[in-house]
Amino acid sequence: MVQTVYPFGGDAAHSDPRQADKTITGGKGANLAEMASIGLPVPPGFTITTEECVSYLQHGAEFSDSLREAVSEAVGHIEKSVGKTFGDASDPMLVSVRSGARVSMPGMMDTVLNLGLNDETVEGLAKTSGDERFAWDSYRRFIQMYSDVVLGIDHGLFEEALEICKEDNGFYADTELSADDWKTLVGEFKGIVSSELNEPFPQDVFHQLWGAIRAVFDSWDSDRAKVYRRLNDIPGDWGTAVNVQAMVFGNMGDTSATGVAFTRDPATGERAYYGEYLINAQGEDVVAGIRTPQYLTKAAREAAGAKPLSMEEAMPEAYTELAHVFDLLEAHYKDMQDIEFTVERGKLWMLQTRSGKRTAKAALKMAVDMEGEGLITREEAVRRVDPMALDQLLHPTLDPDAERNILGAGLPASPGAAAGKIVLDADTAEQWVERGDKVILVRVETSPEDIHGMHAAQGILTARGGMTSHAAVVARGMGRPCVSGASAVSINLSSRTLKIGRQDLKEGDEITLDGANGQIMLGIVPTVEPELAGDFGTLMVWADALRRMKVRTNAETPADCKMARQFGAEGIGLCRTEHMFFDASRIKAVRQMILAEEDAGRRAALDILLPEQRADFTAIFEVMAGLPCTIRLLDPPLHEFLPTQDAEFEELADVTGLGVDHLKRRADELHEFNPMLGHRGCRLGITFPEIYEMQARAIFEAVCDVKASSGEAPLPEIMIPLVATQKELAILKALVDRVAEEVFTEKGTRLDYLVGTMIELPRAALMADKIAEEGEFFSFGTNDLTQTTLGVSRDDSAKFLAPYVEKGIFARDPFVSLDVEGVGQLVELAAERGRATRPDIKLGICGEHGGDPASIAFCEKVGLDYVSASPYRVPIARLAAAQAALK
Ligand code: ADP
Ligand code: MG
Ligand code: MG
């Protein structure tokens, strides 16, 4: 029978490989067992497997008999290890109940601490601890947490009761409440529960335990969890594990504490212990922002100019042990760890470790440093950095020379510059972004309910919370700039106004955040382009040495080409010539060409366009000399270029000498019911060969000119779009070859070029062996290939694709990440058939997918020669291609 529960700590065996498997025991459970197995001090406990969660949810929220048995046995394991009994009135064992999915997942149930307390055991705890105040404080915390996360009672009710008690007594901090005050509050809290639920707070400890386990399982299907899974591409069928663990207490007076720490600085990657702790506190007090946490190290405290003693100074022995544990953990996991710990009366206990979330900058620095330290190999360093995270570094930062009207500052919780309109809640953030605004989400503090708004926002500003607060951790994970704990911010939600420092502001006003130093500025501060040297450069050199595929860019302006080359592009994978047609100076000639009724009129317009197109290509080729450049001949339906406004028609009438009515009629004739499948792509070249002739001539003349002036030419690869048949390509290739011949004869020179096609129709993929008889290269146009294979129009898909992804019909949006299973088959088949005819055929991808790591991994598997991505995505593609080659 499959084991459903795994004990850890105490004298547990930790020998079953399933216990070390995060897919079975979750991240938290697997790491607790692993820490215990290498001899670190972990309070004993047990993990219920993710499989049990899945089976519970499938079986109508029923626990299996085997689970019930295994849990009672495992409770015995904890009891034996700590020498106390669960529910024992004289010396009770208490536990925490913690969720723990495969990957850390905000949205899952919050931890319940001190479970096992009731009206009787609280007295026992008071006696054994010799601290009545502590016992009753623990009990009220338990009632509060359990009621909130398990019983679903609004936590505000309890907070209100506490506030009233403090006000009545003139207290400022929780620490001022005495044992009797807490006792009174416990009575009130229980009253709240009975009046909300019409039944008393559960006193039976096993009833409490099963209630909490049920709540963890149920939270897997909560709305919060679902939103998070959707945003992070986490499948719905993983389930979560449950960890039940003996309590240790950080709230047993001044020799006790609780804290969180990173073995290296998660914002910069610097090799320095980094963290926060609170004396005489429990659980999430550190991250909740109720009290301001203190620094871990003396150096950090001094650097911040803070007074309250660091842990290094206040608890030197526990600190030394903690530092030793940090080193052991890094050596063991060979990665930066994010740690939670508690000190109970001077004794250190480890409550969690995991690979720490980090900014892209820190990820790069750590990968490069750890390679230097001999901790990891170069390949591992390349594998370590998430290609998508590079995005953070490739975007602009605040111009150091720009003027800054600084309103105040908070903690530099997540780096980068962000500017936008102030919004005060997550829903507003999402709505404003949908209508095209850029926003900064400003909150007192954030919670998992705010995730969608944080995602929509450019940046996040909170009034409360430290560097390890919810806002800080989530923002770093998402790559959003964040300033947290800015006490200068005060928000008035009812009037939708706020004050930052002395400045009065309202929702909608613009501010800028600098996540690198925590500054908050009035208005929009200008930005500068990123610097790509240092660790970034080092890692890219390593990645380039490991990858097989080339990386090109999709670009059609010299500026984009320059940028892409700086980012390491090795050619152009897609130059869309129609973008050049939209230019204000030529649109008139383009319209003239389209609306002409005879060849003569069309040729006259094309004569105007020829020198313009040649100039475009010359400018691009100058930047791309020596590199391959795939240029796609005109592709979109002609009517996209047509005038729509009366004024535009009138202007055109002047130029052409044709009447406005006549022009409008002609425009009507060009209207199509389904332009995506209409008169476009090579169909234009077949029906109006003079357009492609003009474009081919412009390309060849430009190549010759650049070769003559600079000595080096690019390799033009002329791409015929939307081909379905061999014949289409044969006709148009002959046209291109003829024009090339003419130009070469005129110029008295002869340069290399290729003619090929985009594979973007299923028929083209199927006929690839025939099409390869003509085409010298294939470029997979996976945007259109996805549209035509799925029969889904991308621009109309927004309405239904999100629900499709939510329901798991597609794992990811097929326009973002290639549908490998379906569309991928056509790519694979076309590659095979193309190579069968022409073994050296060049193969690449030029859809949006060329910048998506998962799709890039597929391209490597199929053996494509290159991928092509937009300029900013080129470094992402370089790293992803290296990772794909390492797989
Ligand atoms: P999260 O996944 O949100 O970090 P955790 O399960 O790690 O939730 O619990 C949050 C905090 O609760 C921990 O960091 C720790 O401080 C406290 N905690 C959890 N279990 C125990 C325990 N057995 N004894 C003492 N504190 C605990
Ligand atoms: Mg939590
Ligand atoms: Mg935790």
Image (tube, rainbow, N blue to C red):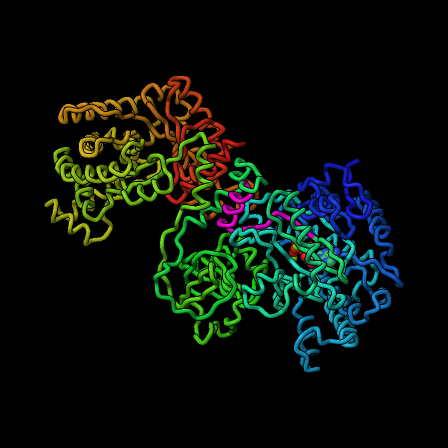
- Number of marks: 0
Q: Is residue 849 visible?
A: no
| Left or right: where 76 falls relative to 687 | right
Q: Is residue 759 visible?
A: yes
Q: Quadrant of the image for the C terminus? A: top right
Image location of residue 589, percent across then percent down: 17, 43
- Taking the spot 50% from the left edge, 64% from the top edge, the residue there is 461
Q: Main secondary structure of the magenta part?
A: helix
* Vertical order, 69 against 421 (above or below): above
Res 608 quadrant in image:
top left
Image location of residue 757, percent across then percent down: 33, 28
Image location of residue 829, percent across then percent down: 46, 24
**Residue 358 lies in the magenta stretch:** yes
- Taking the spot 56% from the left edge, 62% from the top edge, the residue there is 446
Residue nearest the observer in this picture, 491 or 291: 291
Residue nearest the observer in this picture, 623 or 198: 623
- Taking the spot 43% from the left edge, 59% from the top edge, the residue there is 418
Q: Which residues are magenta?
A: 352-371
Q: Ligand 3 lies in which image quarter?
A: bottom right
Residue nearest the observer in this picture, 680 or 325: 325
Q: Residue furthest top?
A: 837
Q: Residue furthest right?
A: 90
**Residue 174 lies in the magenta stretch:** no
* Vertical order, 468 against 493 (above or below): above
Res 292 quadrant in image:
bottom right
